[in-house]
Amino acid sequence: MSVAVFASGAGTNLQALIDAFRAGGIAGRIGALISNNSKAYALTRASQAGIDNYHISAKVFPDPGVFLEKISNVLSTHAINLIVLAGYMKLLPIEIIKRYRSRIINIHPALLPKYGGQGMYGINVHKAVIEAGDTISGATVHFVDEIYDHGAILIQRTVPVLPGDDPESLAARVLEVEHRILPQAVGMFL
Ligand code: GRF
């Protein structure tokens, strides 16, 4: 089974997957990494791991038809069975969501359905959790459909919100859990 990872940033979730596959815990391989951000360190991590990686963005391919074709070509060239969104800040083209229905998962740094949806990404999520005075937070892996952060939940794990927490310290605690549940979810799926 072959996995395509989409990432926009540092790629620590990608790295957790690379390490898990390398450890042999998961039957399959990461066939490709796609990023919309040419400066994403995720691209470097993929190169270092010998994974084919592609910078495909609406800026470079403003025509939606061409953009869709570029992504579709990578997915079919690598015979992808599962798409993993690991800190991917864009919505996938609706055609891809339809074609890969129930074969796209996303990692979100909160306990969905709370703190999900438009604008709820990265540090904004942790700011909202702290401002709400919640005492627990966590991470969620869920199936992707046409609505942001809406699909069925695959795995969820909690972390405490500690009295002295600021968004950064909470983000770090949640990120650790992300790195554990994402490989678990991919392993379950494959
Ligand atoms: C993670 O917090 C993830 O939950 C969110 O974006 C961040 C990605 O981090 N969607 P990284 O690029 O995997 O380090």
Image: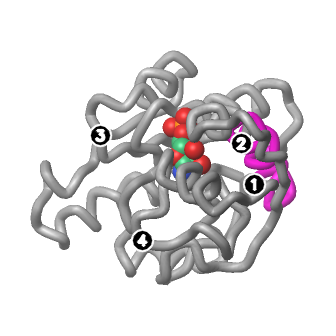
Above or below residue 63? Residue 185 is above
Report how far apart the C-alphas of labels 3 and 4 lie in the structure.
19 Å
Q: Do the residues bearing badges 4 and 1 touch, measured as CB atoms within 8 Å?
A: no
Cβ of disc 2 within 8 Å of ligand 1?
A: yes
- Camera-nearest label, 2 or 1: 1
| Amino acid type at mark 1 | Ser
Q: CA distance from mark 2 to mark 1?
A: 8 Å
Q: Give the x, y percent position of residue 176.
A: 74, 34
Which residue position is annotated with label 1?
A: 137
Q: Is residue 6 left or right of residue 65?
A: right
- Judged left or right of residue 12, residue 87 is left
- Give SS at disc 1: strand
| Residue behind mark 3 | 37
Q: Name which residue type carries label 4.
A: Gln
Q: Residues within 10 Å of mark 2 (few under 14, many from 20)?
A: many
Q: Is mark 4 within 8 Å of ligand 1?
A: no
Q: Nearer the viewer, residue 129 or 39?
A: 129
Q: Which residues are magenta?
A: 174-190
Residue 79 visible here: no
